[in-house]
Amino acid sequence: DTEVTQTPKHLVMGMTNKKSLKCEQHMGHRAMYWYKQKAKKPPELMFVYSYEKLSINESVPSRFSPECPNSSLLNLHLHALQPEDSALYLCASSQDPTNSPLHFGNGTRLTVT
Amino acid sequence: AQKVTQAQTEISVVEKEDVTLDCVYETRDTTYYLFWYKQPPSGELVFLIRRNSFDEQNEISGRYSWNFQKSTSSFNFTITASQVVDSAVYFCALSEGRSQGNLIFGKGTKLSVKP
C-alpha cells in the first residue's frame, strides 16, 4: 500500500462544478507535489510545496488552485475545468525538496464532462 | 536543456526472459540525479532507484539491476528472469542539482510479460 493517500480515486465533474482533490502523507516529508498525467504520457509537474510554502508553479491555469493546510495535507481545488483537463492527478511527497526520491499516491482519475 | 529519452515504446517478452530497458539523458549540470519508476495499471508510480551523477557503481536488487554509464549518458535497467507481475510502464527520470523535485520524465516503456 502506498504511504501517500489520495481521495477520491475517481471524480467526474461538469465544467461549472467546484471540487477538490485531497492528498495526505504521514511520513514527515516536508515537500509535496502535484503532477498531471494524460493517458500514455509521462507525468508533468504542476506545483511544488516546500515546507508548506508554494515554491514552484509550472504556469498552471488559475482554474487549478493548490493549498497546503499543514505539512501532511495537500489539496488541489478545481473550478471551471475544461474537458482537456481530464487526466490522472498524482500527488507525491519527498523528505525534502532537494532531489529526495518522490513517493507517489495512487492518483485521482478525473473526468471533466 | 535537460531531456530523457526512452527509445523503446513497448516491449513484450515471455516469462523468465531477461529484458533491458534503455534510458539516455541529456543535461548540462555536473550534479544530477537519475531515477527509475514503475507504474502498474493501478496508476501509482513506484520508486525503484535513485543514482547521483558522482556514483557510477552499478546496482543490483534482486532481479533488478541498473547500469549507469556517464560516458554514454545512459542509465539502463535490466530485469532478470522476468515475471508477469513485472508488466507495467517504466519511467526513467532526471532531476538536476538545483531543482526542487522537478523530475524530467522520459516517455516511458511499456513492458508486457506473457506467461
Image (spheres, coloured by chain):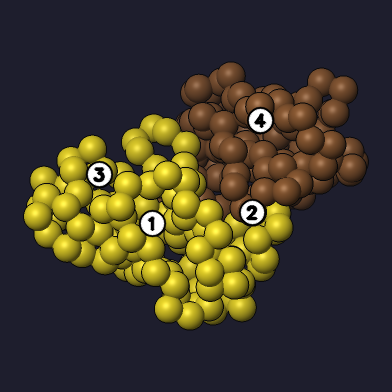
Chain colours: A yellow, B brown
Mark 1–mark 3 Cα distance, whole angstroms, equals 13 Å
Query: From what the image shows, is residue B17 above or below residue A57?
Result: above
Please name the residue shown 67% across and 48% down the image.
Answer: B99
Check the residue under mark 1 and report the chain it is in. Answer: A
| Secondary structure type for disc 1 | loop
The residue under label 2 is: B100
At x 51% / y 51%, what residue is drawn? B45
Q: Can you identify the residue that label 4 sits on?
A: B2
* Chain designation of label 3: A
Q: Which callout, 2 or 4, points at the residue further toward the start of the chain? A: 4
* Disc 1: which residue: A107
Count the numbered circles shown.
4
Are the two marked residues, 3 and 2, in contact with CB atoms closer than 8 angstroms? no
> Residue B34: image x %, image y %?
72, 41
Q: CA distance from mark 1 to mark 2?
A: 21 Å
Which disc number belongs to residue A86? 3
Residue B16 placement: quadrant: top right
Looking at the picture, tell me which residue is in the foreground, B51 or B98: B98
- Does A103 appear above or below B21? below
Q: Secondary structure at mark 3?
A: loop
Q: Is label 4 in a helix, a strand or a loop?
A: loop
> What's the mark number on residue A18?
none
